[in-house]
Image (spheres, grey):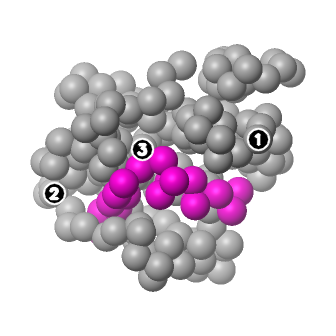
Amino acid sequence: MNVSLPTSARIVVADAGPLIALGRLDALHLLPALFAEIQVTATVLAECAARPGFIDAQRIEQAVRDGWLKPCADEFERPSGRLDPGEASAIARALAIEAGLVLDDRAAVVYARALGLKVIGTLGLLVLAKRRGEIARVAPLIEELQRGGHYLGPRAVQAALAAAGEEIV
């Protein structure tokens, strides 16, 4: 499991999936602890705010108000291929500014990596946070996401737990 981005990727562009997952966990604070700057496109922000009554949306909006989650303009005109508009805008922005990408959707990850982008997903962020001493354990957070209905593939969970040095369940 690739859980680190090169120094040049200290600036990342985040897609909605990881933001929502971290918002549910009340773990959005991990992003500024791991990266110097976190940008989010207008399209991704709109996706995150689509359910204003949900706690994750409220936490994401608070991160924008606090100033560390930085809104930025969209860099695309329409989604390409099987990507949703948020994924397409995040990938286009990361390409435009040569940044890393925080992204979970498997097809979008494959596409972004084919373009030469460095990508880290929610599970990779949790492992990186543990390695840097920001969290004590990854497993309870994975379990909380799964209980909340967040789909995580069994192989991805096993790889994350192994990378974190935790017992595979």
Q: Nearer the viewer, mark 1 or mark 3?
A: 1
Label 3: how many Cα within 10 Å (few below 14, some 14–19, many 20+):
many
Q: Position of residue 162 (x, y in %)?
A: 70, 17
Instruction: Give how far apart the Cα atoms at labels 1 and 3 are.
Output: 21 Å
On whether residue 35 falls in the magenta region, the answer is: yes
Give me the residue at 18% from left, 42% from top: 98
Residue type at tag 1:
Ala
Up-down relation of residue 155 to residue 32 (above or below):
above
Q: Which residue is mark 3?
A: 102
Sequence-first tag of 1 and 2: 2
Marks 2 and 3, Cα distance to the nearest angstrom?
16 Å
Q: Label 3 sits on what residue type?
A: Val
Horizontally, residue 16 falls left or right of residue 56, namely left
Residue 22 at x, y percent in the picture: 61, 55
Which stretch did the figure color magenta? 24-42
| Label 1 with label 3: CB-CB less than 8 Å | no
Seen in the image, is 67 located left or right of residue 116? right
Tell me the CA gap for discs 1 and 2. Answer: 37 Å
Residue of label 1: 136
Element marked by disc 2:
loop
| Mark closer to the observer (2, 3) | 3
Local packing at callout 2 (Cα closer than 10 Å; few below 14, some 14-19, many 20+) is: some
Q: Which mark is residue 75?
A: 2
